[in-house]
Amino acid sequence: MQQLADYLGSNGLLAKQWPGFEARAGQLMLAQAVAECLSQQGTLMAEAATGTGKTLAYLLPLLLSGKTALVSTGTKNLQEQLFFRDLPAIRKLLRTDVSCSLLKGRGNYLCHYRLQQSQGQPQLSNPVMQQQLALIKQWSQHTKTGDLSEVSGLPDDAGIRSWVTSTTDNCLGSDCPMFDDCHVYQARDVARRSDIVVVNHHLLFADLALREQGFGEVLPAVDAVIVDEAHQVPAVASTFFGRTMSHRQLTELIRDLHTEAGQQSGALSLLQPVLDDLQFAQREMLLALAAIDQRQAMSRLLQQVDAAIIGNLEQALSALGQRLQAMTERSKGLLQVHERSQQLLATLQLCQREDEQYVCWYEPRVRGFAMHATPLQIDDMFTRIRASMQASWVFTSATLTVNTDFSYFADRLGLQQAEQLAVASPFDYDRNTLLWIPENLPAPGGQQHTQALLEMILPVLEANQGRAFLLFTTHRALRQAARWLAVNSSFSLLVQGQAPRTQLLQDFRDQQCCLLLGAASFWEGVDVVGADLSIVVIDKLPFSAPDDPVYQARADAITAAGGSAFAKLSLPEAILTLKQGVGRLIRHQHDYGLVVLGDNRLRTRPYGRQFLRSLPVHNSCQHAAQAIDFLQQHALEQRHAG
């Protein structure tokens, strides 16, 4: 423990060697808890508020411990920040030869075999696809990693990506003629030989799901797993421990089958009749679902869609599987397509029957549909996986507790026996933040609520010259606000959906007198430091939609067991989400700002106190004039200080 103080204390090595380093008691406390967890092969849940410096607090004891580890983050951007910035800095400080590697999901790496197969495909004849393909071909000649993020000018959502990358389903493995040059397996080989491997949650839980299903693992065996941004884990784990059958999967199955069968003499002609039936059944299903534009339980969907249409798709997949059965010895590719067709068939069948272990639900998508079977609970499954790995586990995030209580997070993942630590922020929230809950607003969710809230806050936004995030709980309210502000204000409006998130954030930093309007994806993982952002407006409390099928199934299970779905599910989930949204405001010790919560239930309902107790912002005002005075005073102080 003293060793960590020698690094993180006020007279420690970092204070002497890192310009701008400030010793923080909470950071040292967290580092000591992580060190103890690593030494005892324990499990730790640690909430570390913004400003704690949690990355250093877990990386430093990890590197000092000499243990091998997986470090998992919420996004690829955070993953790259850890690998390219944070780890090199600490390794240099410690003068250690600990080896580190960065590993992403296979969809990020070029597949030479599929790049070769893509040549001459008629679906790639449009100019955009041709341009993207040419970029990738040129880059492929000299890349060492095969990571598509290196390709300058290639968007993250480029359509060509699915043509030149592999999936678990279509990868030929060691049977691939280009296996010796495979970027995925080369990256995995480097990871297996590394002491620390930086991954993201999607890759981590895709791997854990494979272990649970008995298919082995991709990630190396390690002494420790450190999960940053751990509040995302229950949702990510539920996705990967579940099953999905989608329009896109069907399309890729048909596409890959055409390619594989075309390389085997006579195979395509034998398969063409069942392929035609599958394509017809897919189009028929797509047409039948076109008018159903809301997520809903499969039981409800089955009442709206002709059973014969789903039956035709089921029959087409079954017939394809039977025809392919006799061809699986011709090639590994045909064998894999056969296995994929049967997995999709099994998922389609699962989604049509009642299963007490799963929530079966339908999701409309921009260009198709998806049917999901999501586990109702994952705690037992996750407990088995952790026990089998025999590793230390650290779960850390700025938002794990509800009223300082870890129970909600712990219960969802089976972590009731884990050690707990909550570290408060070193920032002076009492001095630098203010909360305003406008009075006499219409009921949240009503047609008049959004406009009434905007009318109340507009003078504050104007006095502050914008520099505000407006966060909404629904896309309907977001669109309504954008329309009203376009007519009634002179602000430059940056609206979610008009451009990629990274571009909107950059524009927000660069432009004057602008507002950024966002929904769910802007409530977390968005950092704007300094006076560029000094107001966060949240339209209403972020309760889950009561008709959401996954929420409803879990709520029903809690009620059936004699509990309160509101107290045990809806309320804690909303509190954690609100904490994430409010957390966008203060990212640095010199930041200041106003939080506007446009929901009078915080004052009028008993549960409102639980929300307020969970927030770091405690001082409040009653009127717009007070909010304006607060912002102007802090802006003046910053100008004098600067």
Image (cartoon, rainbow, N blue to C red):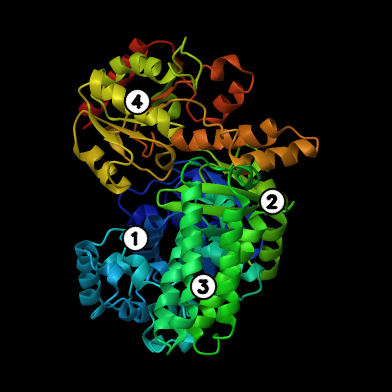
Name the foreground residue: 314 vs 175: 314
Q: Which mark is residue 274?
A: 3
Name the residue carrying label 4: 481
Q: How crowded is mark 1: few (under 14 residues within 10 Å), some or many (20 or more)?
A: few
Residue 452 can be seen in this image: yes
Q: How far apart are marks 2 and 3 (CA)?
A: 38 Å
Q: Can residue 170 be seen in this view?
A: no
Choose mark 1 or mark 4, whichever is in front.
4
CA distance for labels 1 and 2: 37 Å
Q: In which quarter of the image is residue 588?
A: top left
Of labels 4 and 2, the one closer to you: 4
Disc 4 element:
helix
Point out the tag, 1 or 4, that comes first from the N-terminus: 1
User: Which is more N-terminal, label 1 or label 3?
Assistant: 1
Residue 377 numbered mark, or none: 2
In the figure, residue 119 lies in which quadrant?
bottom left
User: Circle 1 sits on which residue?
Assistant: 85
Assign a secondary structure to mark 1. Answer: helix
| Label 4 to label 2: alpha-carbon separation | 37 Å
Q: Position of residue 70 (x, y in %)?
A: 52, 66
Q: Nearer the viewer, mark 3 or mark 1?
A: 3
| Contact between labelled residues 2 and 4, with CB atoms less than 8 Å apart | no
Query: Could you give the CA–CA distance between mark 1 and mark 4, rounded to whole angstroms?
Result: 38 Å
Residue located at (19% from left, 36% from top): 511
Q: Contact, CB < 8 Å: mark 1 with mark 4?
A: no
The correct choice, above or below, for 54 with respect to 316 in the image is: above
Q: Which one is in front in this view, the residue at disc 1 or the one at disc 2?
A: 2
Kindly state the secondary structure of the residue where label 2 is placed: loop
Q: Residue at x 40, y 55 (%)?
A: 78
- The mark closer to the camera, 2 or 3, is 3
Query: Foreground: 355 or 73?
Result: 355
Query: In this image, 266 relative to 119: left or right?
Result: right
